[in-house]
Amino acid sequence: MTELGWLPVHPDLSAAITQARGLASAGDRLNAAIALAGFRRDSLATLRIDKLAQEARSEAKPPENCLERRVAILASSTVEPLVPAIRVAALHRRLLLDIELAPYGQFRQAVLDPHSFLEAMRPDFVLFALDEAAALAPLPIAARRDEAETALDREIEALAALWRRARERFGAVVLQQTVLNTRLPLFGSYDANVAGAPAALIDRFNRKLADAAADAGVLLVDIDRQAAWSGRAAWSDPVRWHQAKQAIGPAAAPLYGDLVARVIAASCGLSRKCLVLDLDNTLWGGVLGDDGIDGIVLGQGSAAGEAYLAFQRFAASLADRGIVLAICSKNDPDLAEEVFVRHPEMHLKRERVAAVMANWDDKATNLRRLAKTLELGLDSFVFVDDNPAERAIIRQELPMVAVPELPDDVAHYDLAIAQAGYFEAAAFTAEDRIRVRQYTENAQRNAELASTTDMEGFLRSLEMTMEAGPPRPEDLARVTQLVNKTNQFNLTTRRYTEAEMERLIQDKSCVILRFRLIDRFGDNGLIAVIIARPHPGERKTLQIETWLMSCRVLARGAEAACLNVLADAARRAGATALLGEYRPSSRNAMVREHYRRLGFQPDGEQPGGVTTWRLELADFAEAKTFIRIRE
Amino acid sequence: MSTMADDTLAKLQDICREVFEDPSLRLTSETTAEDVPNWDSFNHLNIVAAAEQRFGVHFRTSEIESLKNVGDFVEMIDSKRKR
């Protein structure tokens, strides 16, 4: 497949482009084009975004934090249809390119002729884009190996002379793309044994080209290797070749443009530097807080466990090449650290991770903290999280963070991230090799930094609706299950059998509520249960003996919404006060201050850390949330 | 016209509206390239490319050159979508 699978899908990209064209100010249109370039787009949408940006650029100054560069493309085939795709992929990286092309088929003349267009243009980058026919003069199939090698070396040397010339004349960074090898096998696999076989010659050419480029400090754009991943047949379109001499077909244009743009961006220092990973269902299967260190799925023994292990290996290899790793997870901080130490199958070792940000704050806040701790810009972050809602939050709150769309199965995460080309390099230095250690030390030095984020806009945009009320008969099994498996956000960790639960539901003096939360990403299902019964000693007082919630919906104001519903139900049951209780367990430290946060007053402490809390309903004013309640 | 042809015509019209950045462009079976400003060979290839990608079809070399009007284009797309 040649689609840009890591970019999010816009709900209606075509309409959004049309709408952006209607914006009055050219600056706004250019900024809109930059934002739209970050969505998954086919060749037509790419053309339209390019047109939008080009027209706006002729009127507007470049936006802040954008670089401008001039790129000359010296090609042997028709590349005009590919130019918009390069510009749009660069635009997504806040890189504004002015691209000029050598006249068709005149890539040599452009470099050698002192009066060519390059003289006036003074390009920052020169891209050599050769097709099979231009790369290599025909050789007889029966050519001997030494004859083939001599012919190949001659072509490569001629090309290297052009590279040197381009660099001397303009000080330009030279890019050389590999030749898309669409020559068909004549002998089958045996082609490799025949020096003069057409497909074998191009393979050999590409290998020699890579070596020569490395020696000359020329940056390779390895389109042939990329095409091998997505299918050469999807890249080339013989009909287009016969019709218009396009070596790369329009369907592959967006991906081709991205490959070129990411190498230019890497050379400008715009590649990403830091990979931020979620923990639960990203580095292992399951929820650490609920399943425990021994209960998470990781390692040999199950296919799922091995898939998580393989993803950890991929992350560790990125660390080895100098990418900074960090963790951002809604989890108990101590428990998260403990997994690294105690879980025998953790391939990703703690010392390879520069910083761990595990707590119950929202992830935008935590990413900001990570940026400060690591002294890196948010625009150097790639954030990987299995949860689509978390991804959407970060895209909205921190648009400078790259957030790849991920396949359903962790087995495909590594490929998805690799395909996105976030970490494209223009060098591999000794400094890269030691970078991870350096960042780890810096992170330890920098203490926790407080930071706040305005969450209101985000919470509003989630369009949350809470369905609250007493459990219905068909809910009984699921309510009991949630009550018995929730460990972290669970104030008392009381367990109930289904029969006990049924009796409670029938007891009219008790208030039992179950909550579902629906947002624009879908139904989160049953997310909370509250059980309150009349206090044995105090009249008109309800004691909350169980309050638990699913950690999936933390930091969204759901707790406050639950209390609003509970207070209402308690008043209707004739109560004037609520009593809360926190019983510490090994897992529920996150809710120690739960009642205080909701406005309850401390009402005593017992041995073992059990605390009780009180809320007078007469004093209670409904808390503001962004959740609509329905029965 | 069949419902499939109507659907194809509507989608082709959407593509052309995008290519020409003209949200009010209307195509009928009788529309020819001469009727639409800027329908030159470059934009023709853009339309063909978008039609191939969005309808999931491939046109033969000879087919692309032999189209007389939009009706022909729709018929050609439909003959491939059916298969």
Image (cartoon, rainbow, N blue to C red):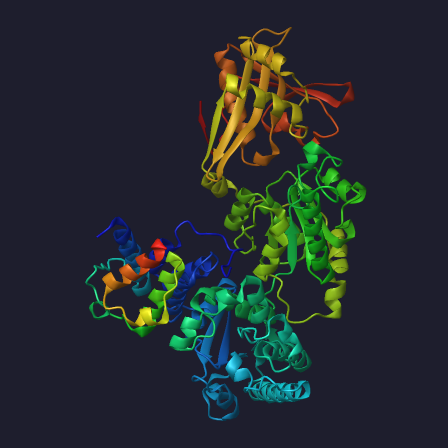
Q: Is residue A183 above or below residue A344?
A: below
- Of residues B17 and A78, the one drawn nearer to the viewer in this rendering: A78
Please indicate whether residue A336 sits to the left or right of residue A113 in the image: right
Q: Residue at x 61, y 77 (%)?
A: A200
Name the quadrant of the C terminus of chain A.
top left
Please indicate whether residue A528 sits to the left or right of residue A346 in the image: left
Residue A516 position within the rendered picture, expressed as x and y whole percent measured from the top left:
51, 28
Residue extending farthest to the bottom is A114
Residue A459 position within the rendered picture, expressed as x and y whole percent measured from the top left:
49, 39
Q: Is residue A53 above or below residue A339?
A: below
Residue A377 position within the rendered picture, expressed as x and y whole percent measured from the top left:
61, 58
Residue B33 position within the rendered picture, expressed as x and y whole percent measured from the top left:
24, 69
Q: Place residue A605 in its image quadrant.
A: top right
Please indicate whether residue B22 sits to the left or right of residue A356 in the image: left
Q: Is residue B69 above or below residue B2?
A: below
- The answer to whether one can see residue A246 in this image is yes
Q: Place residue A579 in its image quadrant.
A: top right
Number of numbered discs overlaid on the protein picture: 0
- The answer to whether one can see residue A130 in this image is no
Q: Residue at x 66, y 26 (%)?
A: A485
- Of residues A78 and A95, the one drawn nearer to the viewer in this rendering: A78
